[in-house]
Image (cartoon, rainbow, N blue to C red):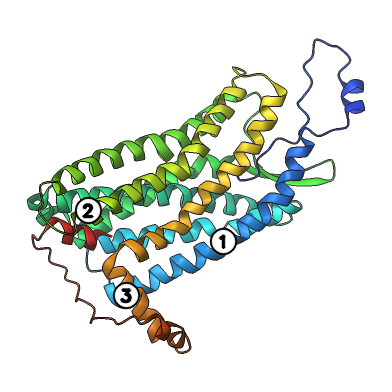
Amino acid sequence: MNPTDIADTSLDESVYSNYYAYESVPQPCAKAGVRAFGELFLPPLYALVFALGLLGNSVVVLVLFKYKRLKSMTDVYLLNLAISDLLFVLSLPFWGYYAADQWVFGLGLCKLISWMYLVGFYGGIFFIVLLSVDRYLAIVRAVLSLRARTLASGVVTSLATWAVAVFASLPGLAFSTCYTERNHTYCRTRYPANSTAWKVLSSLEVNVLGLLVPSGIMLFCYSLIIKTLQRCKNEKRNRAVRMILAVVVLFLGFWAPYNVVLFLETLVELEVLQDCTFERHLDYALQATETLAFVHCCLNPVIYFFLGEKFRKYIVQLFKSCRGLSVLCQPCGLRLDPADASSSTYTQSTADQDLRDAL
C-alpha cells in the first residue's frame, strides 16, 4: 500500500487496438486523467500535511520531554503516537515528488520509505487505541488502574505495539520495488504474477487493522467512559464528553472514507465490480480520501492543545520560553499557572481529572 499506487494504463488507444488482436481479450481501463489529476492535486497537499504534521508533533515531543518528563503510561503513549506520526509525515515529501514526476531515489529508498509509511500508519492507529484503553482504565476501572497504569507497563506495551506495527508492514517492505516502464520510473508494491490473493489480503489487512478493530475498541471504551461520567455530578462532565466525541468522530471521519474506497478497490481486484468508468471514479476517490486520512496525523496535536487543559498550558509555556515567540504571545493575554508536577504514582481521583490527565 503506497500512496499514488494508481495503475498506469494510459497507453495510446491505437496501441491497445494493435496489441489486443482479439475482441475477447478485455482491454485495460485508460486512466491518464487520474494520473494527471494526481500530479496536480497531491504534491501541494502532501507538502501542507508534512509541514503541519512535522511542526505539531515536534512540539508534542518537546513538551513531553521538557515538562511531562515521561512519568506515566499516558505520557509514553503520547510520545509514541507523536513518533509514529512523525515517521509517517517524513515519508510524504518523497511521495509528493513521486506524484509530481517519477521515482528518482532508487530501490533502497523505495523500500525504506514504503516501510516508514506503513509503520507510521499502523503505529499511529495502534497508539490511538492504546490511549483509548488507558482512558478507559483511568475512569471506568480506577482500582485496576492502580496496578495496570504504570510507567513500566506503558514501555512494555509500547514495545509490543511497535513489534506488531513492524510485522504488519513487512509485506509492504518485501513487495515494494522500483522499476522503469515506458521511460517512467515507479516505486510500487508489486506482488508475484497472478497473485490476486496478496493484493486482497493487503487491502483487508488495512481495513481490519486500520479501521474495524480500532473502531470497535474505541467505541467500547468510550461508550463505557461516557456512561461512567454520566454518574458524576461535576461541572466539567459535559466538556469531557465533548472531548471524547471529538476524538471518535475525527478518527472515523478521516479514516472511514479511505477504508471504504480501499474495500471497493478490493472488489475491483476480485472482478466483482467491472466497470471502467467506476474504476476511474474510484481512483479519484482513493487519492482524495487517502489525503484526507493523512490529515489526521496533524490533528492529534490540535486535539491535545484545544481539549487538553494541562497540555495547552505546557505548549503556551514552551512558546513563552522561546525568545522571540514570547512577544507573539503577549497580546493574547495568556497567563500561565505553574505547571503541576507530574507523578509516577497514580492515585485515585475524580473521573474528569483522570480524563484531562489522559489527554
Identify the image quadrant of residue 80: bottom left
Residue positioned 22% across, 53% down in the render: 238
- Taking depth in this image into account, of 223 and 11 the one nearest to the observer is 223
Q: Relative to 68, is 284 above or below?
A: above
Of helix, strand and loop, which one carries label 1? Answer: helix
Q: Relative to 295, is 151 above or below?
A: below
Is residue 8 visible in the rendered image? The answer is yes
Residue positioned 29% across, 39% down in the render: 219
In which quadrant is the N terminus drawn?
top right
The residue beneath circle 1 is 50
Of helix, strand and loop, which one carries label 2? Answer: helix
Image mark for residue 314:
3
Which of pointers 1 and 3 indicates the residue nearer the eye? 3
Comes first in the chain, label 3 or label 2: 2
The residue beneath circle 2 is 238
- Taking depth in this image into account, of 147 and 244 the one nearest to the observer is 244
Q: Determine whether, in the image, residue 345 is placed left or right of residue 278.
A: left
Amino acid type of the residue that numbered disc 3 sits on in the rendered structure: Tyr
- C-alpha distance separating marks 3 and 2: 23 Å
Amino acid type of the residue that numbered disc 2 sits on in the rendered structure: Asn
Q: Position of residue 235 (x, y in %)?
A: 16, 59
Q: Position of residue 318 (x, y in %)?
A: 37, 80
